Image (cartoon, rainbow, N blue to C red):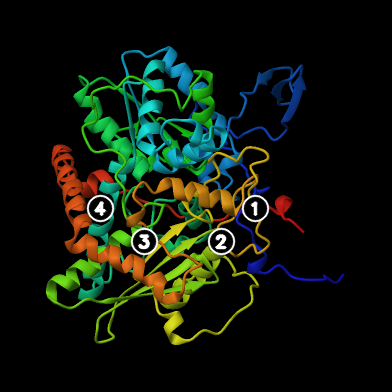
Amino acid sequence: MAFSGALSVTDLNDYLGPSQVCIKPVEAPTPSPAPGGEVRQPLTQTEIAIDQGTYYESNGQRARTQLETAQISLNDCLACSGCVTSAETVLIGMQSIDEVEQALASPGGRTFVASISPQSLASLATRYAYAHPSSSHDAPLTLPVLLHRIAYALRQRGFHVVTDTSFARHLALREHVREFRERRAARDSGAQDAPRLPMLASACPGWICYAEKAHGELLPYIAATKSPQQVAGVLAKQCIGPAHGGSPVYHVTVMPCYDKKLEASRRQLEHEGVKEVDCVLTTGELHDLLLASHFDPYATVPDEPATGAWPQLLQEPGSSSGGYLFAVLHCVWAEWVAAHPGAVPALELRVIRSVDYTDYVLRAPSGETLFRGAQCYGFRNLQNLVRKIQRATGARGARRPGRGRMVRRGAEEDATYDYVEVMACPGGCVNGGGQMRPPSGAGTQRDADADAGAQGWQGTDKSWVQRVEAAYWVDHSRRAAADAQMAADAQAAAPQRVLDAATKGALHAWLAGADRAAEDVEAALGVSTTQAFRTTYEGIAPQTNGLAVQW
């Protein structure tokens, strides 16, 4: 039998469905010793029978034992190696609106905290703006206004504290930079057993899940710093809880991604047996919850005194996925400028196939490479990133590589990165699978070239993602991401100006103020930031299941 063609890496798309290999292993009980000391061997003749929907086990004698119904939890899903990012289709009912409403109906003296991602707010603002054109209202629906009105609506439902995750993200970025410095110092000193470079971002749970299941050899390169969602959980449980009389905290986050539900279920992300995040809702689920409360985003609500202990909606420069690459790049830039007064390094940008894969190279005036990084979004680009890191570091996985087309590249292209901002969704977090879809007839345009830019999830397209991206940026002057429509020299100019402003301009003063608030919170935790804001990962061995082979 001949095949007409072979699957190559370039045939992959970014929307992978659940695998057929999704099995919870059967755990057989250990044989118990008989009264005489002999170990009873299990009976070999065992039958399973169904009677009116109930399962029974029979050993061939008259006695029958009713079997318990097997249940698959989210933790079981994390332990499986059969899928990549199918969290959006696997048992998400364990973290849903129903769970939140049940908790609110039985508060039990708990403090209810909601943390909403800026990407979710941008998605909601875009959707509401289309349904209610701003021209018919007194003022456009900005993210601060929308957050205030959502917070008011959620407080009416029983929440005590409603904030966004931008301050938690600022704490995560600070820890990210600390970890990068540690890894760079270990590399420069020649330490063998220390975490190494390149350092790969850790904020995307889809990417983490994929690496644990398919590329365990890359886990030493993934940052140990927790995501903003989990840092927000640390703040909720260890700061907000004690500030409200020490009562237990029920923490809900609103995220643009279904995979965040899996992230919150990781056993590594618990503190003394208590989850940092109790329930995760997607942007769409928050919308449904608000609809049940007859929420009108354009209806004014009473002004309330500021109750947050830290700043809200911090506009980090960089990408709409959080600015991780920019934070590390700014660290290198600021250190070099401080050591070389009067000199300014040059930033080079190179778009590889699409803006979802962009190289950033920082060079001294002498031509010396100071830093090499990248933004890599979407699973199609992740395949290329994995191969590049494997070539540069010698890391090899247990699984055989695919039959993708091999292209010989020059030494410059094969040079290893210092840092990569990795996101599983094309377009980054603003294009997460849990974001709002455009209404029917929105008139968004379809782009014939699938690689021209960020393609949306089902029901969306590039132009809708661009609308959400635009709504995300409260301060457009801080956006330093590449733009595919600009010339190569102009691409580097925007982030280079932002880097310079972050070192000595108004942006520098703004970042210093956010850092002071972060320092106060870090000191109040009572433990080191390494202990509070870092986690671990576990490689998962692939399971072999002949019945699930796809021919």
Residue 489, image x and y in percent? 40, 76
Vertical placement of residue 35 versus 191, above or below: above
301 lies left or right of 68: left
Residue 266, image x and y in percent? 42, 41
Q: Closer to the N terminus: mark 1 or mark 3? A: 1
Secondary structure under the numbered disc 1 in the rendered image: loop
Name the quadrant containing residue 49: top right
169 lies left or right of 331: right
Q: Is residue 323 visible?
A: no
Residue 112 — which label? none
Distance of label 1 from label 2 (alpha carbons): 13 Å
- The residue mark sitting in front, 1 or 3, is 1
- The residue mark sitting in front, 3 or 4, is 3
Amino acid found under the numbered disc labelled 3? Ala
Q: Closer to the N terminus: mark 3 or mark 2? A: 2
Residue 445 — which label? 1
Residue at image mark 4: 175
Name the quadrant containing residue 8: bottom right
Vertical placement of residue 409 versus 98, above or below: below
- For the residue pair 224 and 419, the one nearer the viewer reads as 419
Residue at image mark 2: 453
Amino acid found under the numbered disc labelled 2? Gly
Residue 352, image x and y in percent? 51, 72
Distance of label 3 from label 4 (alpha carbons): 21 Å
Amino acid found under the numbered disc labelled 4? Glu
Distance of label 1 from label 3 (alpha carbons): 25 Å
Mark 3 touches mark 4? (CB < 8 Å): no
